């Protein structure tokens, strides 16, 4: 076998999940990756998937692993090369990331009796959030949700009164790559950059409000979970934020939207990052 292999994971091997320790020492190539396929809840505390050439997508993470790690991974997935009675099969598929397409191994179901309940949105972490509906959750705002004015106009400001800090999402840049009818909207692109924002603690009713505002049900933004490094030195894990499903070329946002972002960032995010936001808007042709 070669020195390194790529592996796409979508369930208990994902970051902060119960079997992620089996990927210890592996390099994460993409936290926001997806593959064509259909995801199912087995009812046994873990998901499974089957490949598909349809529009269905399964979301997960892409890792670079050592060949010797396959021994433990194959044991976990009850996979023996060439065995027709495997619980899972290990196959190669195209993996889509913000940086392009990769080829990686994926464990897919070899037994139809595991395909118990479809997870229509294709994300195991999101599925558990929707099922558990926790009383409170951390939410990271990097765009217009840093500003309170639209919250107040929507009579939703009561959900966003508890701010737990200001911090940074490492590995991502904020760009205006979601095309609205009047210009671009903010998104995080996984390209090795850094994005500052506001960390809220919100009730679950606030999550439902965000799902509506961010167009989750309409296929605009999808909920994702990230780690945030606060400026006071704390790291908060599994924080909810939003990531555009289908990114386009970056275009200038409308002035009213740019004003919301700058108003929410001024005096809260770092001066260096605020200046970067201004320069980004100027570079897109806005007179701010």
Image (cartoon, helix red, strand yellow):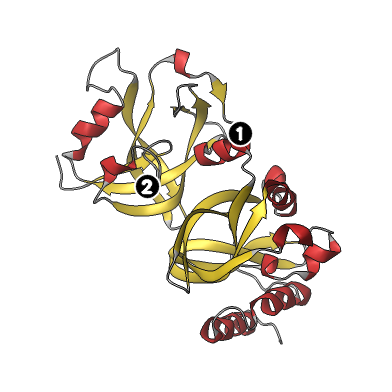
Q: Is residue 262 left or right of residue 4?
A: right
The answer to which quarter of the image holds residue 68 is top left
Answer whether labels 1 and 2 touch (C-beta < 8 Å).
no
- Quadrant containing the N terminus is top left
| Relative to 122, residue 216 above or below | below
Task: Give the tally of numbered discs.
Answer: 2
Between the C-alphas of marks 1 and 2, the distance is: 25 Å
N-terminal label among 1 and 2: 2
Q: Which residue is the site of mark 2? A: 62
Task: Give the percent coordinates (x, y) of residue 250.
Answer: 60, 68
- What residue is drawn where x is 74% and y is 51%? 209
- What residue is drawn where x is 73% and y is 74%? 260
Task: Give the percent coordinates (x, y) of residue 272.
Answer: 52, 85
For mark 2, give the secondary structure.
strand
Task: Give the percent coordinates (x, y) of residue 56.
Answer: 56, 34
Res. 212 visible in picture: yes
Task: Give the percent coordinates (x, y) of residue 256.
Answer: 78, 75
- Quadrant containing the C terminus is bottom right
Q: Is residue 1 left or right of residue 226?
A: left
Res. 246 visible in picture: no
Q: Which residue is the site of mark 1? A: 131
Residue nearer the viewer, 103 or 70: 70
Residue nearer the viewer, 259 or 52: 259
For mark 1, give the secondary structure.
helix
Q: Is residue 240 left or right of residue 32?
A: right
Q: Residues within 10 Å of mark 2 (few under 14, many from 20)?
A: many
| Relative to 13, residue 29 above or below | below
């Amino acid at each position: 076998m070669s020195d390194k292999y790529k592996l796409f994971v979508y369930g208990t091997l994902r970051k902060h999940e119960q079997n992620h320790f089996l990927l210890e020492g592996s390099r994460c190539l993409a936290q926001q990756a997806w593959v064509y396929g259909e995801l199912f809840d087995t009812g046994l505390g873990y998901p499974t998937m089957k490949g598909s050439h349809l529009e269905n997508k399964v979301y997960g993470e892409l890792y670079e692993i050592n060949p010797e790690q396959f021994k433990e991974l194959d044991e976990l997935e009850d996979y023996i090369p060439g065995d027709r009675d495997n619980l899972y099969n290990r196959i190669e598929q195209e993996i889509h990331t913000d940086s392009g397409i990769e080829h990686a191994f994926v464990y897919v179901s070899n037994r139809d009796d595991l395909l118990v309940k479809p997870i229509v949105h294709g994300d195991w972490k999101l599925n558990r959030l929707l099922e558990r509906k926790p009383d409170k959750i951390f939410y990271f705002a990097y765009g217009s949700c840093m500003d309170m004015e639209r919250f107040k106009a929507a009579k939703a400001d009561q959900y966003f009164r508890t701010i737990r800090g200001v911090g940074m999402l490492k590995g991502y840049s904020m760009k205006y790559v979601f095309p609205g009818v009047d210009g671009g909207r903010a998104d995080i692109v996984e390209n090795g950059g850094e994005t500052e924002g506001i960390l809220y603690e919100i009730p679950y009713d606030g999550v439902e409000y965000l799902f509506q505002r961010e167009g989750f049900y309409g296929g605009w933004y999808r909920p994702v979970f990230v780690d945030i490094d606060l400026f006071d030195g704390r790291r908060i894990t599994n924080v909810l934020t939003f990531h555009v499903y289908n990114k386009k070329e970056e275009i200038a946002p409308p002035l009213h939207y740019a004003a919301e972002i700058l108003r929410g960032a001024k005096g809260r995010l770092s001066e260096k990052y605020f200046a970067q936001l201004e320069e980004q808007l100027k570079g897109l042709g806005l007179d701010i």
